[in-house]
Image (cartoon, rainbow, N blue to C red):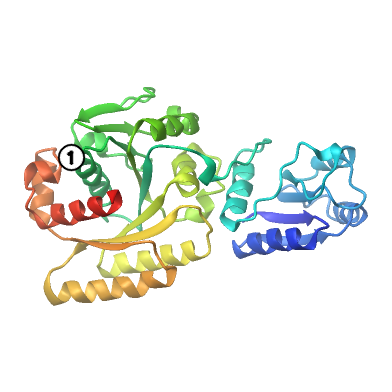
Amino acid sequence: MPIVVTAIARAEVEGFIASTLFAQGWSVVFRAIDWQSLEEFVTEKSTDLSSTLLIYGSDLPGITKERVNQLSSKFKQVIGFATNTTEEFADLKKAPVVSADLVSLVRSFIRTPMLREFVPAQNQIRRAKIFAIGSAGTYTGCTLIALNLAMELSTQGKSTLLIDANFRAPSIFDLLSMRSSETDPTWKSIAPNLAVFEVTQAQAIEIEALMFRAGKEFDYVIIDLGSIAGLSNRLTDRRWTSTMTTWSCDHADELIVVSRPDLLGVSRLQKVVELLAQTSIRAKISFVMNMKSSGKKGEAEQSKFLTVTSPMKPFRVRSINSDIRAVLAAQVERATLIEVNERSAVRKSIAELASELSS
């Protein structure tokens, strides 16, 4: 996890930043009260700062732009906030006042070390509601839910984009007997009101622009993230494989975590819940238990599921009934559940979820 040094005079601003980052598991190793104390710290630790992040405020006694520039090379990254009114630091922005916004901004600097202007998510106008679907482990049916959820929304007359961002095992194009393109930056229409797109390394560098466009053109965007194990590490990862995960946590309306009810599935869900409890993201968090059994066994599975997820105070909690026959039939025919058997239990469960998301 990142190592942080703060250099901000305003106690309430510095306290908020330090405590917020500490709560994410980041080590705040020094809190300078003036420029002299910061310089003394750097002199003592000059060989150990290559992985350290400096966060400074324009109100720090003794600070000048020249001094900041001279010291910047000692740190991995330097972030400045306007903590008072001064012409010398007029280009700095005020620090975010919401924990999730602060963490998101700091992560973005770590991933892409360049100056940027902070734009709160709520100020970014878009037409689409965006739902990212992540798997708590493997074989949870995350992709099946994403595909069929997108289809259900499209049948409601809502223009929907389905994005395959599961870089480990992209499968949506295969499930639909389609050929993906490594370099094509556009989505493909596959049914009335439904288009699909697969994120590859070539498109990852254009994700911000692509998602901005998608948010303007569609009513709904469904993102299949695949496994979200190790989420906190991926949020500061610069590799292209983490691009959509970080974008989704920062900008999606919801992150929907899918799990399965067996012993291993519950164990992996518990680990993801523990990780999410320590990770601040902007997206609302919801949980879906897939492959729920019928009868008393299903009731026991539901009870265990609620016990694990309730401490997170999720935005929504749903379960999807198991129907192996319908799922296999859809795979064989390379089709969605509504096309194969619209009366199946699993299709009805996903249709109910789609109605809830669109209400």
Q: Where is 56 relative to 118, above or below? A: below
Tell me the SS state at disc 1. helix
Name the one closer to the observer, 85 or 194.
Answer: 85
Query: Picture coordinates of residue 61 (x, y %)?
Result: 91, 52
- Kind of residue sitting beneath label 1: Thr
Number of callouts: 1
Q: Is residue 288 left or right of residue 81?
A: left
Q: Is residue 250 in view?
A: yes
Crowd around label 1: few <14 · some 14–19 · many ≥20 (10 Å) = some
Residue at screen point 39% across, 32% down? 214
Residue at screen point 8% across, 46% down? 329
Name the one closer to the observer, 313 or 297.
Answer: 313
Name the one closer to the observer, 154 or 52.
Answer: 154
Q: Is residue 197 left or right of residue 299?
A: right
Name the one closer to the observer, 202 or 121.
Answer: 121
Q: Where is 20 relative to 141, above or below? A: below
| Residue named by callout 1 | 155
Residue at screen point 25% across, 67% down? 261
Query: Picture coordinates of residue 327 (x, y %)?
Result: 13, 50
